[in-house]
Image: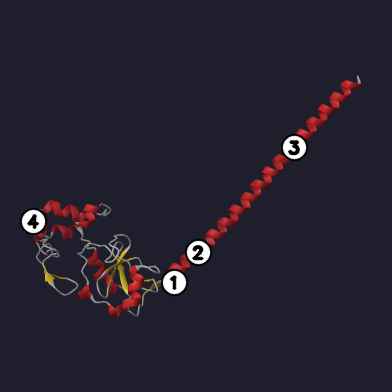
Amino acid sequence: MKNENFEINSNKIKENNQMITKKRLRDENNNDQNISRVLLIENNKKEDSLNLSFSSNTSQKINTDCPYLGTIKRHMLDFDFEKVCSLSLSNLNVYACLVCGKYYQGRGKNTYAYTHSLEEDHHMFINLHDQRIFCLPDAYEVIDNSLNDIKFNLKPIFSKKEIDNLEKSYNISKALDGTEFIPGCIGLNNIKRTDYVNVIIQAMCRVVNFRKFFLEYEDDTTDLVRNF
């Protein structure tokens, strides 16, 4: 009888210990979850504050009254060359100097464009991909309507009506350097005997449907379309 009571008591003790252990584990899990929630909230607050500070810094880096606008030399600009850095020969994140017309990569510290701005005292640069214009080495974006003609010559955009009237209209246009030309009849830069390519492209551009495809095509992620 004593042995049976002892076994019963020991079983109860084991059950109680197991219940206590389970409760402790549940409490620990709840505490861990609460701590995780707190940490998550804290991190979200930090990220929000960082995003706010970043957006405020970004907005501060936009200038509508840049003192270097007068240094731009439009007659030096030619966007028909291959859009690669003149030093690294990379086509990633390339900018054109709006003073001398040369192409350089990057705009952050120690990049080719940044170094060029310091060494040559040239401060106005345009991104050859998204047409945004920056002042270096201060690295703020310049917003000014007087720069729209440069952006248009870098990436001309035509309405459907203008494209349809190309065959009917022969209005004389002017390049950034003042040269007059008829749209659709201007040649390519002759670099090391490329005149035969010039002839082929001129002939292809006279095919109406072929020309309209490239002028109306909005997605320029394809290398063939972008380069043409």
**Element at label 3:** helix
Give percent across and percent down for residue 194.
12, 61
- CB of mark 3 within 8 Å of CB of mark 2? no
Judging by the rendered image, the residue that carries numbered circle 4 is 203
Whether tag 3 and tag 4 are in contact, CB under 8 A, the answer is: no
State the separation of the CA atoms marked 1 and 3: 58 Å
Distance between the alpha carbons at the discs numbered 4 and 1: 49 Å
For the residue labelled by badge 1, is the local secondary structure a helix, a strand or a loop? helix
Horizontal and vertical percent position of residue 109: 40, 69
Between disc 3 and disc 2, the foreground one is: 3
**The N terminus: image quadrant:** top right
Q: Nearer the viewer, residue 149 or 96?
A: 96
Near-viewer residue (128 or 151): 128
- Return the disc, 4 or 2, that comes first in the chain's sequence: 2
Q: Quadrant of the C terminus?
A: bottom left
Quarter of the image for residue 155 reads bottom left
Left or right of residue 37, residue 116 in this image: left
Q: Earlier in the sequence, mark 3 or mark 4?
A: 3
Between marks 4 and 2 in the image, the one whose residue lies nearer the viewer: 4
**Splitting the image into 4 quarters, where does residue 14 fall?**
top right
Distance of label 1 from label 2 (alpha carbons) = 12 Å
Question: What residue did someone put label 1 on?
Answer: 60
Report, in whole angstroms, how far the alpha carbon at label 3 lies from the one at label 4.
86 Å
For image coordinates 40% across by 74% down, the residue present is 138
